[in-house]
Image (cartoon, rainbow, N blue to C red):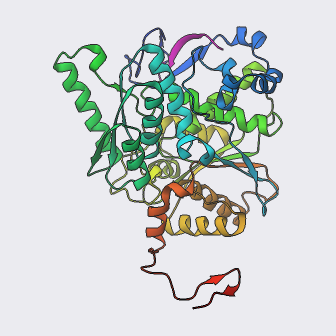
Amino acid sequence: MAVITSLECSRCHHHLSAETPQTLCPLCAGSLYVRYDMDKLKHTAKREDIAARAAASPSSLGMWRYASVLPDVTPVTLGEGWTPMLHSKRYPGLYVKEEGANPTGTFKARGLGLAVTMAKHYGLRHLAVPSAGNAAGALAAYAAAADIKAHIFMPQDVPFANYLEGIVYGADVTMVDGLISDCARMVGENIKAQRDANLPASEVWFDISTLKEPYRVEGKKTMGYELVEQLGWQYPDAVFYPTGGGVGLIGMWKAFEEMEQLGWVTGKRPKMYALQASGCAPVAKAFEEGKPASEFFQNAATFAAGLRVPKPYGDAIILDIVRQSGGAALAFSDEEILASILDWAKHEGIFLSPEGAAATAAYDALIANGELKPTDKVVLFNTGAGLKYTDMTAEAMHLKRPGSLPKSMPVGGIITPQ
């Protein structure tokens, strides 16, 4: 496993020690990246060892197969990572990275799994997070596994599964009449009040928000390692990623940089597409307007709950990656997202999350306008299992549970007796 040399600010490039837990850069409030001695890793981290190590050791399964480029700690793991890469039936170049196969049913298991691992390593006892839903469920699960108390703040209209997860895993759950930005404010206010009250350090919450600590990016970067390994250590032409907070996109870009430094992959990096819902599209709007950062998106509303982030903390990083790569940030309506859910369920057998369907809607649009060819190699992320959104998707479809069963029911093409 890799020894951390420092934490580097993504804005001003100031370096901090990783000996104690850190949140943001103390000089400019930039997000921190974990840095390793890459020259040393070139000699010790070999890509050909990954599969053999994973086969030989249960501790190297899932995303921990990349332990040689992750912090040197004892993992808190529920089996996250190494998710399926599904080849589309209809598009020869398209692969769907099925993150719904993770523990708690979403990609959030990767970032929170590693962040909670580091929290346990540091001896933290209380973790707090504002969440659009799925991060809350993942934090609750991993905190329970680590014997750490989770404090969760979520909008009151998140999918019911997210609320249930928090309660079942024993987290302290607060439902908020507002957006994730309101939840973040409340987390900050609580932490400030605890410090002002001079509570013991062990009782003060640690803010584990998106990009406000360095290790969720490290967990999410494993998606970049995986997709390249699963494609035979080659880059695809493009990556389509549903973007709320954007940690996964940022993490993958970091993974590409590391793999190139290690000599694990060569060639042109993929075009990165950040996909949003038109009801909450701060990054897509900033991209279209040529701005370096987004503005707070007013009256954010979409049934793709994970995309309802009106002002991502890492917006400038996301926009820079998208532009560097030659990709784009695009937004699609809830109607287009729902249509894509139904299309993919019927024709591919995949029940997409609404966020994942924003990516498939984008893919279909770019195929239709000729920007992409069906043979272009594209990896598209379904960031969560559609079954976690049954209430939201059913509501979008205006579908309700039948009040009673009909007197006769079709079964396998046969009508049963009345």
Identify the image quadrant of residue 22. Answer: top left
In the image, what residue occupies the spot 26% across and 26% down?
A: 191
Quick check: can you spot residue 200?
yes
Give 86 or 289, whichever is nearer the viewer.
Answer: 86
Give 356 or 144, whichever is nearer the viewer.
Answer: 144
Q: Is 80 in the magenta?
A: no
Q: What residue occupies the far left of the structure in this picture? A: 197
Give the image location of residue 109, x and y in percent: 54, 37
Magenta residue span: 1-12
Identify the image quadrant of residue 387. Answer: bottom right
**91 above or below 270?**
below
In the image, what residue occupies the spot 56% across and 49% down?
A: 384
**272 above or below 338?**
above
In the image, what residue occupies the spot 78% across and 22% down?
A: 56
Identify the image quadrant of residue 357. Answer: bottom right
Give the image location of residue 6, x and y in percent: 53, 11
